[in-house]
Amino acid sequence: MPAMSDLPYKGDTVIGNDVWIGYDAFIMPGVRIGDGAIVSARSVVTSNVPAYMIMVIMGGNSAKPLKERFASDVAARLQALAWWDWPIESITRHLAHIVSGDVKRLSECAKKG
């Protein structure tokens, strides 16, 4: 068995906030998965995943982008809101709006605190 120092270093694997990773997915070393992305079950992720992208297996081993979860302007608004960084009390108070997918309402919640 090779020593750790004999293996190539691919960098840190970074998983963003609000990411869903399906059962038995395999994420290669050094891959970055953006906020809000979805990785389907049994996917093999070999390259970076943009924020709010849905990745699926479409014949073969490497997961491929299926579609964006939101339009790019909505995804940018969600990242700017960064509800995952809110105090736990605010998350709890506004949980219904967080899970609703209503970005306008979520923006209003962010202003209220």
Image (cartoon, rainbow, N blue to C red):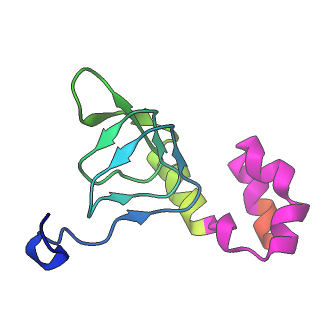
Residue 3 sits inside the magenta stretch: no
The residue sitting at 19% across, 75% down in the picture is: 4
108 relative to 53, above or below: below
Q: Examine the image and state in which quarter residue 109 appears.
A: bottom right
Q: Residue furthest right?
A: 93
Image position, residue 40 (x, y; %): 45, 34
Q: Against 44, is 92 above or below? A: below
Horizontally, is 102 left or right of 21 in the view? right
The one nearer the camera, 70 or 64, is 64
Farthest residue, direction top: 59
Magenta-highlighted residues: 81-107
Q: Main secondary structure of the magenta part?
A: helix
Residue 112 at least partly seen: no
Query: What residue do we see at 46% from left, 33% from top?
Result: 41
| Image position of 4 (left or right of 65) | left
Numbered-mark total: 0
Which residue is outermost to the front?
Answer: 1
- Can you give x and y, in whole percent of width and height, for residue 6 in the image? 9, 74
The quadrant in which residue 77 appears is bottom right
Out of 13 and 107, give the one closest to the viewer: 13
Residue 46 percent coordinates (x, y): 24, 48
Does residue 79 appear left or right of residue 43 in this picture?
right
Query: Is residue 98 found inside the magenta-colored segment of the image?
Result: yes
Residue 9 visible in the snapshot: yes
